[in-house]
Amino acid sequence: QLSHKLVMLLALLSGQRGQTLHLIDIRNIHFQENSVKIVIGDMLKTSNAKRHLGEIELMKYDVDPDLCVRHTLSNYLEKTETRRGSVTRLFITSQRPHRFASRDTIGRWMKSVLTMAGIDTSIFKPHSTRVASASAAHALRIPVDTILRTVGWSSESTFRKFYNKDITLNADMSKRMLENYTQ
């Protein structure tokens, strides 16, 4: 359950693809007092010699530690420390032998969380979290350049064409997202 929770919090708050979440290496996770910074060292689908995803910074959410990605990540690392052996990828399987979780496994975890939340997974897939995250940020009037930088896009036209969807946010969700993007 902790793996599922963490993967979904990371997906929703960072707007990253499953591939990026799969490649997170614990040696590249840096806890700060009020945030956690994650550097992706591996090449991604959209990486090239001139452009690579910058550092992902996720803010601490003191209002509710159960929804705080920094707290959840710290807890996950603590709980998996004795099981991971030499595995340095963040996500590991829960069954022995504990290996790093594949991209497909991470996608299944995300789909499972969507299903538990009552979301129709015949329509919305794990990649839909990327659309939801970017669209919600835009609905909160987060500057487009901040969204592009956070998610790792270089083209505003890609965001506008594929990811900028009309969504409705409740007041509590709006407040949490604004705190994460603006700090």
Image: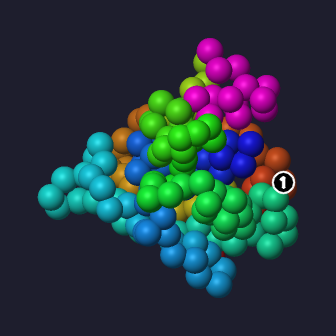
Residue displayed at 53% across by 33% down: 105
Q: Nearer the viewer, residue 103 or 141?
A: 103
Horizontal side of residue 17 vs 166, given as left or right: left
What residue is disc 1 on?
171
Q: Point out the stretch of residues depicted in magenta.
A: 108-122
Q: What is the x, y in percent for residue 91?
A: 54, 49
Q: What is the x, y in percent for residue 52?
A: 28, 59
State the residue lying farthest toward the left.
49
Horizontal side of residue 89 vs 135, given as left or right: left
Looking at the image, what colour scheme do you see? rainbow
Q: Nearer the viewer, residue 24 or 180?
A: 24
Q: What is the x, y in percent for residue 29?
A: 49, 69
Quarter of the image with the C terminus in it:
bottom right
State the residue lying farthest toward the top.
122
- Residue 52 falls inside the magenta stretch: no
- Residue 111 falls inside the magenta stretch: yes
Residue displayed at 53% across by 41% down: 97
Using the rendered view, name the quadrant where residue 151 is placed. Answer: bottom left
Q: Nearer the viewer, residue 161 or 32?
A: 32
Residue displayed at 62% across by 37% down: 95
Residue displayed at 41% across by 42% down: 19
Quarter of the image with the N terminus in it:
top right
